[in-house]
Amino acid sequence: MKITVIGCGRWGSFIAYYLDKIGHDVTIYGLSDAPEMIRFLKERRNDLLELSDTTKLSTDKKVIAEAETIIISIGCQGLRSLMGELEELNLKNKKFVLCMKGIEIATGKRLSEIVTECTDPSNRVAVWLGPGHVQEFYRGVPNCMVIDSDDDELKISLVKSFSSELIRFYYGTDLIGSEIGGAAKNVLGIAAGMLDGYNMTTLKGALMSRGTREIARLMKAMGGNELSAYGLCLLGDYEATLFSKHSHNRAFGELFVKGEKFGALAEGYYTVKALMVLKEKYSVDLPICTAVYDILYNGADPKEAMSSLFHRSLKWELE
């Protein structure tokens, strides 16, 4: 399969590395002034991995038009702008695979919805979600992931083409739930980091349980399947997001409550703002996400905001 990966950050570069390794024809597209692309062109490596000689690098958009499958791995708030830039290529009959997790703040829309809105109807869209860190995959530690789409033929062909001994893919069955779970787990990752920062790590069990319940309610309200919250998109990704030393969102939350800055991208910071849009639109109670939002955007005291969750009215656990 001829593939172009848009985005040369840690995840995009790994995807290119991985797909090249299992036999696909892969090109990484990046901007000529992007620090990551400059280093790849010079050294063919970053701090996490080294690209093989067969992985191509390009700053020319023509490689996007030439691809059969276009994989996008960028900051999710820049997706609509990217799709606008791609209009000049008049892309048709392409497979778009979104290897990114988030919700558009301005509209509360899922990422697959944005691509569908901004591209020709002949193009098809899928999402690639689930647990795993570049550092672990690169040293050969396997994991399970999921590919989901409203197009059954597309997701079946992608799962068959992308599976290997390193990554076992499952067929997703609920695109709404998969995307919401994949995005929301980053917000819970920030909350987990805050608990770590206050040496209250033992509360992560409660965070996982109650966080799963509130995201399940949102999935159902949006027309998805609430059971998706217990799949790879959310519950299955908790170890990588809420506990791993490699998790950007967990590290961001921990350093935030310690008054220290975190220099890398933590998607949950933006996603929680988008979740507040969905909370109002669908009238769903999201207490943990709301607490994180109040801390990050309204200046709420982190310890008080997290503690307030214990002072909510008493209720049945699985109500």
Image (spheres, helix red, strand yellow):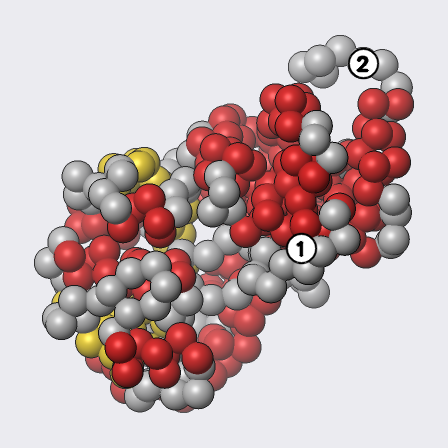
Q: Quadrant of the N terminus?
A: bottom left
Q: Residue furthest top?
A: 316
Image position of 252 with respect to 73: above or below: above
Image position of 171 with respect to 18: above or below: above
Image position of 55 with respect to 225: above or below: below
Q: Residue placed at 68% from the left, 50% from the top?
A: 255
Q: Say whether residue 3 is left or right of residue 247.
A: left
Q: Is residue 203 visible?
A: yes
Earlier residue among tags 2 and 1: 1
Among the 4 quarters of the image, the one containing residue 94: bottom left
Helix, strand or loop at mark 1? helix
Q: Residue placed at 54% from the left, 77% from the top?
A: 81
Q: Which residue is mark 2?
A: 315
Depth check: give the residue in front, 177 or 134: 134
Helix, strand or loop at mark 2? loop
Spot occupied by residue 162 in the image (x, y as percentages of width and height): 21, 50
Among the 4 quarters of the image, the one containing residue 29: bottom left
Q: Quadrant of the C terminus?
A: top right
Given contact means CB atoms under 8 Å apart, are the residues at marks 2 and 1 in contact?
A: no
Q: Say whether residue 47 is left or right of residue 266.
A: left
Mark 1 belongs to which amino acid?
Tyr
Q: Which residue is mark 1?
A: 269
Residue neighbourhood size for the residue with mark 2, other residues' Cα within 10 Å, grouped as few (<14), some (14–19), many (≥20): few
Depth check, mark 2 against mark 1: the one in front is: 1
Q: Residue placed at 51% from the left, 46% from the top?
A: 247
